[in-house]
Amino acid sequence: MNKKHLKLPLLIILIILTISLFSGCTNQKIELDGVEIREYQGERLNSINDFRENSIKGPQYLEKDNYTLTISGLATTPQYYSYDQLLTLFTSYTKVVILDCVEGWRVRILWDGILVKDIVQTAQPNQTANTVIFRAYDGYSTSLPLDYITENNILLAYKMNNITLPPERGFPFQLVAESKWGYKWIKWVTEIELTDDENYRGFWEQRGYSNSGNLNESFFEPK
Ligand SMILES: Nc1nc2c(c(=O)[nH]1)N[C@H]1C(S)=C(S)[C@@H](COP(=O)(O)O)O[C@H]1N2
Ligand SMILES: [Mo]
């Protein structure tokens, strides 16, 4: 073959390489604002990149400066908190918790967050409030018993593996609903509503997933 004949195959290979580079053939990594830790107290942790993105409307991009968390419903003093207020007014806690999705994957992550019960207390819930409805920026919602949240010190997380939650993972806050299926781990939380409606059903619960969401039970509602 002379030089002229080599040019076309080379050009084709170059085009294929360029297309695959820009079309996601390469593993799409989330940009992080630091180095995530992968081990905590002798335990291996999963990576922020081990999650599968399966949110109802894809990743949401909330701005820290425009963010408000509303505490509403059956409460004497509804509250509105900015991102900075939440991180300065409330004590932070750390725990390693595994998220299990109904699709069959799980991730073990170190979470930093504030206690939902601390935030809720500042709104002075009525005696009749027994359920907490969480609402998110993408229209998603879910609910959990107030007792579950209080007794298990449930976190509203702002960091995972020591890094601020990236948009894809729920910035500014994801609920760490330990011992519950992944669909209870609401991301991009914007509202916490106190109610006496124990039968409220969130996005996936309306579509047949169990309202308790207990990991040790089937996620399909027993009929
Ligand atoms: N706002 C919102 N939160 C959500 C969802 C969603 O679609 N929207 N999906 C849930 C489901 S089904 C799972 S398994 C977890 C997964 O978290 P990840 O998307 O960060 O992997 O997020 C949960 N939180
Ligand atoms: Mo899920």
Image (tube, rainbow, N blue to C red):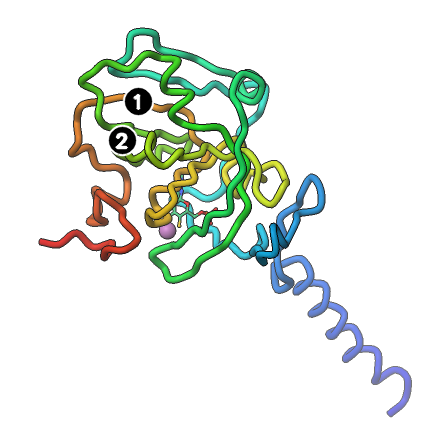
Please tell me in which quadrant of the rendered image residue 17 appears: bottom right
- Residue 193 image label: 1
Q: Nearer the viewer, residue 57 or 100?
A: 100
| Amino acid type for the residue under numbered disc 2 | Asp
- Residue 147 image label: 2
Please tell me in which quadrant of the rendered image residue 165 appears: top right
The residue most toward the top is 77
Please indicate whether residue 160 sits to the left or right of residue 191 in the image. right
How far across and down, in percent of the image, does residue 100 sit? 39, 54
- Residue 181 sits above or below residue 202 on the image: below
| Amino acid type for the residue under numbered disc 1 | Glu
| Position of the N terminus by quadrant | bottom right
Earlier in the chain: of badge 2 and badge 1, it is 2
- Crowding at label 2, few (<14), some or many (≥20) Cα neighbours within 10 Å? few
Q: Residue at x 16, y 34 (%)?
A: 199
C-alpha span from label 2 to label 1 = 14 Å
The residue most toward the right is 3
Query: Could you say whether the residue bearing mark 1 is in a helix, strand or loop?
Result: strand
| Mark 1 lies within 8 Å of ligand 1 (Cβ measured) | no
